Image (tube, grey):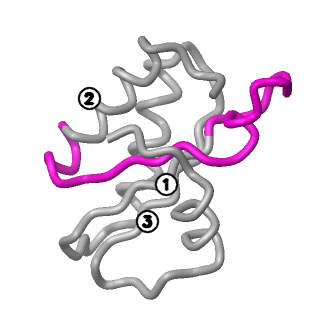
Amino acid sequence: MRLTPEAIAIIVETVKSRLGDEAQVRLFGSRLDDNAKGGDIDLHVSVSKPLPEWVWESAQLAAKLERLLDGRKVDVRLMDASQEAQPIDRIALQEGVLLC
């Protein structure tokens, strides 16, 4: 996994502060490959409550994380209780690494 402990702590703290302690964050995609170079940070965030503005919240979370992680590109897929799982969700849940 190509994330520093400091980056993981920033991600976890930011997600928990915005979405609560029950939020789960998984890293998936190219950052799981230790032999790869570069690439964005793909995060799957799931919460057990419905979020009326989940698209807006996802964009805000990605923007904040990009600022805190020195401009690294961050993609956030936010899945709340009101959504049906999409193929990207199944991939992230099966292959992703749980950060919190």
Label 1 crowd bin: few (<14), some (14–19), many (20+), radius 10 Å: many
- State which mark lies toward you, 3 or 2: 2
Label 3 crowd bin: few (<14), some (14–19), many (20+), radius 10 Å: some
Q: Is residue 14 left or right of residue 89?
A: left
Q: Are marks 2 and 1 in contact (CB under 8 Å)?
A: no
> Residue at position x 21%, y 50% from top?
19
**On the image, numbered disc 1 is attached to which residue?**
44
Which dot marks residue 13? 2
Question: Quarter of the image containing the N terminus?
Answer: top right
31 up-or-down from 50: above or below: above
Q: Residue 49, image x and y in percent? A: 18, 72
Q: Residue 42, image x and y in percent? A: 61, 45
**Furthest residue in direction right, as rendered:** 36
Amino acid type at image mark 2: Glu
Q: Of the residues under marks 2 and 1, which one precedes in the sequence?
A: 2
Residue range (magenta): 17-41
Q: Of the residues under marks 3 and 2, which one precedes in the sequence?
A: 2
Magenta segment includes 33: yes
Amino acid type at image mark 3: Val
Q: Is residue 16 left or right of residue 39?
A: left
Label 3: state its secondary structure.
Answer: helix
**On the image, numbered disc 3 is attached to which residue?**
55
Q: Residue 59, image x and y in percent? A: 47, 51
Question: Quarter of the image containing the C terminus?
Answer: top left
Q: Are marks 1 and 3 in contact (CB under 8 Å)?
A: no
